[in-house]
């Protein structure tokens, strides 16, 4: 394959950021196309790339791939740079477990319910749904406790070693920590907090951090 690589995504998407973090960690140059999946005027263009109208979508010299975990796997395997997949079977399995927790249990309550209603919608000039926010925050402790146990074990979520699990999880916890109560929940779990502090200054995390200040200027959609 050639080096023609394009990532289509949405600037504020946690999943787009996960893909961009892996590319940054691997040093993979790529073109980037911005499409807002929530904008009905852009929906047609996105559906031509993704049958369900989601982001991100990766195109590598005509090989098109969607679903974030598949994209992360592909970029890690297809390009040079440090491997982001542990060699040890137990660590590799734990990495996959974290990524499964992210998709199955964490994304909806911590991002779509908590962050969106506490932070994102108010920045857009809209009023968040307090009931949805409350539901998201109520679900958070059990999820964070599970991650704390994994971080304490040390196979993954290790501040010294970057893996696909870190890139998949960090964009979501970074958003959740923008809620003061969310930041407090993370801080009260020492292993997870140590990992989060390291991720906050990780270069791949820093160069992919979305600029939420533009939401003030754009106003409601």
Image (spheres, rainbow, N blue to C red):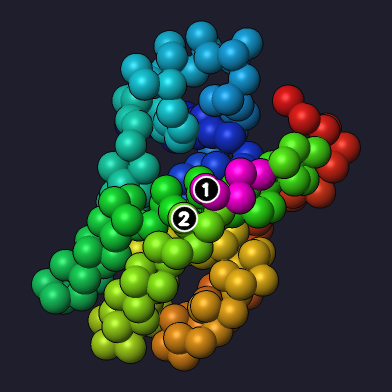
Task: Identify the main secondary structure in magenta.
Answer: helix
Residue at horizontal 61 percent and vertical 72 percent from the top: 181
Graded by Cα atoms within 10 Å as few (under 14), some (14 to 19) or many (20 or more), the crowding at tag 2 reads: some
Along the horizontal axis of the image, is 166 left or right of 128? Answer: left
Q: Residue at x 45, y 64 (%)?
A: 138
Q: Which residues are magenta?
A: 128-132
Q: How many marks?
A: 2
Residue drawn at point x = 35 percent, y = 64 percent: 165
Q: Which mark is residue 135?
A: 2
Q: Does the magenta run of residues contain 199?
A: no
Q: Which mark is residue 132?
A: 1
Q: In this orientation, which residue lies closer to the viewer: 136 or 57? A: 136
Tell me if residue 59 comes above or below residue 45 in the rendering.
Answer: below
Q: Measuring 33% from the left and 30% from the top, which residue is drawn there?
A: 65
Q: Relative to 204, is 39 above or below?
A: above
Q: Are marks 2 and 1 in contact (CB under 8 Å)?
A: yes
């Amino acid at each position: 394959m050639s080096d023609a690589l394009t990532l289509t995504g949405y600037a504020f998407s946690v999943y787009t950021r996960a893909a961009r973090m892996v590319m940054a960690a691997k040093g993979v140059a790529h073109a980037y196309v911005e499409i807002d999946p929530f904008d009905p005027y852009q929906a047609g263009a996105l559906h031509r790339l993704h049958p369900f109208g989601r982001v991100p979508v990766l195109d590598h010299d005509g090989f098109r791939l969607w679903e974030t975990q598949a994209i992360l796997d592909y970029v890690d395997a297809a390009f040079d740079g440090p491997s982001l997949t542990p060699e040890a079977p137990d660590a590799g399995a734990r990495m996959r477990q974290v990524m499964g927790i992210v998709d199955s249990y964490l994304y909806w309550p911590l991002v779509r319910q908590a962050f969106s209603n506490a932070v994102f919608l108010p920045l857009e000039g809209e009023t968040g749904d307090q009931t949805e926010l409350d539901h998201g925050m109520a679900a958070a402790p059990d999820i964070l406790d599970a991650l704390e146990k994994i971080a304490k074990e040390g196979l993954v979520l290790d501040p010294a070693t970057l893996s696909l699990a870190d890139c998949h999880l960090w964009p979501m916890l970074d958003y959740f920590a923008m809620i003061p109560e969310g930041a407090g929940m993370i801080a009260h779990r020492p292993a997870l907090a140590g990992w989060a502090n390291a991720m906050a200054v990780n270069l791949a995390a820093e160069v992919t951090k979305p600029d939420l200040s533009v939401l003030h200027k754009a106003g409601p959609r």
